């Protein structure tokens, strides 16, 4: 394990990221229950309220919740500077996020505009406070300028993604605005999945993969150029889509320009896929590690989504939107998050307990190793449940009779993740209690 770049003196309290990690799988459980309740009807239209509710349970309730916790942990350790007020602010943001997601989902399912108004206020406050807490670090001159650069690009992409999301949410809260939902929903999904998700995976992977899997550092030129080029391509595509839709009165633009931009974006994403796969293949530590399979699954899901989209350009494919959504949300984003949580949670618990035992020599043997926090067997079960549920979701698009089975395995997937994280945190609390019961080392000269 390569820890030379980490600032271990600026580790935030363990509950700062863990409050987000522990609550996130519960939104996945709610999404699975909603799919189980909907059954075959879920695939009738992507614009149904049930579909929108389930999508946001996964994207905001699960994905954004985990990413917030990860950034609260990731930034101080990489930059050697704590996020100002993170201990108290994280608790407030966490509560606002939960309130915002639940009211937004309830608004979709009940169509009460008052619930959307509450969601706008709660989610707007949560993301606003989160952005403001990161701002001092993003504008300061810190030692690791490459990480700061990546975070600045991520920050801009997140602002655009959330801005489009709040614009749509405001349209639900104030129906008189009469927004073009389909146009801005597609742009919101584009920025969220191919912008924010891809770039945060790129940033986190560039630090996590070399650290845990003994791989050479990612190229600084690659990390500086590719995120910026992806963001600029998305900007041009968005402006072109909006302008062309207003001129033609539809949500589609002129084929040549649109497909040229799409080709550029596809090429950039393929560079990300193959470069990351190449780095994984070059790892020096060849010991089998199931968590690396989550990274491979995520990258192959993105590759499949790109190839599927281009195949559909020449050979029209029914239910393409559903297939792309499953590949990008469940295959790409949630796969990476699963693998990241199994690895990072084990490491954080080991790190915090080891730090507490330094002044207590008798307690050194009480610190569990990472394999004891979340065992290899538990990670293997997680991977199989995730792979099986994702496969069933893809098949059920064309064979709706399998939807209930897909929902059951999906429910098991998130329940298992929740159990793994909770038992890991309980192990931390038990070990911490035993460690603190040991006498501190006396320093007499």
Image (spheres, rainbow, N blue to C red):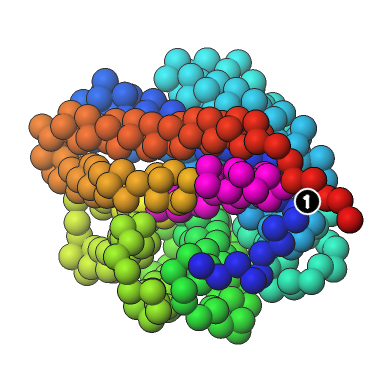
Q: Is residue 149 visible?
A: no
The image quarter in which residue 156 lies:
bottom right
> Residue at image x 32%, y 51%?
376
196 sits left or right of 33 in the view: right
Q: Which residue is most to the front?
A: 445
Q: Position of residue 137 (x, y in %)?
A: 80, 57
- In the picture shown, does residue 356 fall above or below 156? above
* Camera-nearest residue between 361 and 430: 361
* Camera-nearest residue between 199 and 257: 199
Q: Position of residue 320 (x, y in %)?
A: 26, 52
> Residue at image x 48%, y 19%?
106
Q: Which residue is most to the right?
A: 445
Magenta segment main secondary structure: helix
Q: Position of residue 138 (x, y in %)?
A: 78, 60
* Camera-nearest residue between 111 and 141: 141
Label 1: state its secondary structure.
Answer: loop
- In the picture shown, does residue 114 fall above or below 289? above
Figure disc tally: 1
Judging by the rendered image, the residue that carries numbered circle 1 is: 82
- In the picture shown, does residue 94 fall above or below 233? above
Residue segment shown in magenta? 339-367
Q: Is residue 30 visible?
A: yes
**Label 1, residues with CA under 10 Å away: few <14, some 14-19, many ≥20:** many
> Residue at image x 64%, y 21%?
118
Q: Position of residue 142 (x, y in %)?
A: 81, 68
270 sits left or right of 319 in the view: right
The image quarter in which residue 87 lies:
top right
> Where the C terminus falls, by quadrant?
bottom right
């Amino acid at each position: 394990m390569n820890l030379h770049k980490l600032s271990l003196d600026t580790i935030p309290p363990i509950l700062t990221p863990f409050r987000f990690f522990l609550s996130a799988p519960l939104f996945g459980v709610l999404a699975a229950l909603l799919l189980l309740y909907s059954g075959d009807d879920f695939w009738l239209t992507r614009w149904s309220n049930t579909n929108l509710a389930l999508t946001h349970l996964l994207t905001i309730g699960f994905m954004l919740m985990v990413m917030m916790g990860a950034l609260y942990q990731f930034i101080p350790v990489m930059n050697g500077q704590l996020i100002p007020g993170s201990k108290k602010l994280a608790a407030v943001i966490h509560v606002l996020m939960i309130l915002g997601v639940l009211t937004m989902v309830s608004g979709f399912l009940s169509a009460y505009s008052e619930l959307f108004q509450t969601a706008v206020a709660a989610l707007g406050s949560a993301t606003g406070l989160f952005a403001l807490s990161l701002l001092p670090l993003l504008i300061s001159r810190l030692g690791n300028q490459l990480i700061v650069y990546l975070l600045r690009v991520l920050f801009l992409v997140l602002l655009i993604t959330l801005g489009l999301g709040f614009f749509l949410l405001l349209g639900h809260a104030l129906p008189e605005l009469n927004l073009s939902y389909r146009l801005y929903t597609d742009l919101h999904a584009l920025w969220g999945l191919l912008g924010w998700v891809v770039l945060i995976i790129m940033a986190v992977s560039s630090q996590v993969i070399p650290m845990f899997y003994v791989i050479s550092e990612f190229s600084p030129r690659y990390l500086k150029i590719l995120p910026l080029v992806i963001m600029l391509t998305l900007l041009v595509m968005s402006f072109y889509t909006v302008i062309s839709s207003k001129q033609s009165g539809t949500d589609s633009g002129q084929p040549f320009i649109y497909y040229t931009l799409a080709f550029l974006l596809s090429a950039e994403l393929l560079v990300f896929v193959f470069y990351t796969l190449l780095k994984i293949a070059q790892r020096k530590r060849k010991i089998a590690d199931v968590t690396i399979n989550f990274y491979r699954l995520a990258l192959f899901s993105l590759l499949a989504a790109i190839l599927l989209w281009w195949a559909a350009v020449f050979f029209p494919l029914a239910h393409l939107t559903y297939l792309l959504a499953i590949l990008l949300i469940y295959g790409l984003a949630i796969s990476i998050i699963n693998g990241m949580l199994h690895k990072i949670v084990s490491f954080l618990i080991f790190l915090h307990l080891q730090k507490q035992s330094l002044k207590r020599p008798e307690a050194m043997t009480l610190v569990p190793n990472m394999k004891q926090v979340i065992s290899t067997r538990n990670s293997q079960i997680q991977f199989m449940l995730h792979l099986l549920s994702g496969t069933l979701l893809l098949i059920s698009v064309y064979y709706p009779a399998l939807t209930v089975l897909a929902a059951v395995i999906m429910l098991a997937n998130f329940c298992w993740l929740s159990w793994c994280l909770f038992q890991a945190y309980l192990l931390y609390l038990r070990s911490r209690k035993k460690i603190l019961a040991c006498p501190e080392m006396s320093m007499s000269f």
